[in-house]
Amino acid sequence: ELVRTLDANFGPEKGEKGFGTYSRTREGSFTVYRRSADHVSTGYGTPMKWSLFFDGAEAMHFSDYFRRGGYQIRSYGCIDIASFEGARWVYQHSPLGTPFIVYH
């Protein structure tokens, strides 16, 4: 049963113009292994509110950049959510161990 849909943005295709070596968000089946409501990226210094980590440093999180800039703004591999309230809702309903499936 579909409960909710949200606009999401993924990492760029490898070699995509303007993104250098950053790569597309990995597809597959994962589980949420870490949660951080007020995370800040250590690599980029950017806020990652409502982060649900599912694959290494990749997480689903709210992105104000995506909210303001739309689909021409890309992530560096994370799944960016444009809706603050939507990302918060997913965070609140996803405890550790929650299945997380990524496909584009």
Image (cartoon, rainbow, N blue to C red):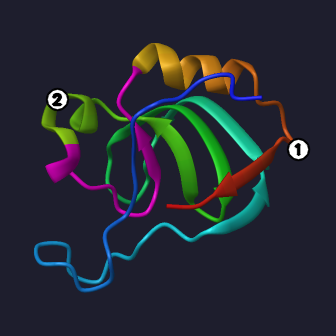
Prevailing SS of the magenta stretch: loop
Q: In the picture provided, is 46 more to the left or to the right than 102? A: left
Residue drawn at point x = 39 percent, y = 22 percent: 83
Label 2 environment density (alpha carbons within 10 Å; few <14, some 14–19, many ≥20): few
Q: Residue at x 66, y 63 (%)?
A: 55
Q: Residues within 10 Å of mark 1 (few under 14, many from 20)?
A: few
Give the percent coordinates (x, y) of residue 25.
48, 66
Q: Which residue is mark 2?
A: 68
Amino acid type, mark 1 = Gly
Above or below, comparing residue 85 to residue 21 in the picture? above
Highlighted magenta segment, given as a residue range: 71-83
Q: Nearer the viewer, residue 2 or 10?
A: 2
Q: How far across and down, in percent of the image, does residue 93 sit?
A: 75, 22
Left or right: residue 12 versus residue 50 is left
| Residue at x-position 47% and y-position 30% | 6
17, above or below 80, in the image:
below
Looking at this view, name the residue that lies furthest to the front.
1
- Circle 2 — which element? helix
Residue 43 quadrant: bottom left
In the image: residue 10, left or right of residue 67: right
Mark closest to the chain's N terminus, 1 or 2: 2
Q: Is residue 38 magenta?
A: no
Give the residue at mark 1: 97
Quadrant housing residue 80? top left
What residue is shown at x 19% (from left), y 39% (from top)?
70
Q: Please tell me whether mark 1 sits on a helix, a strand or a loop.
A: loop
Q: Is residue 73 magenta?
A: yes
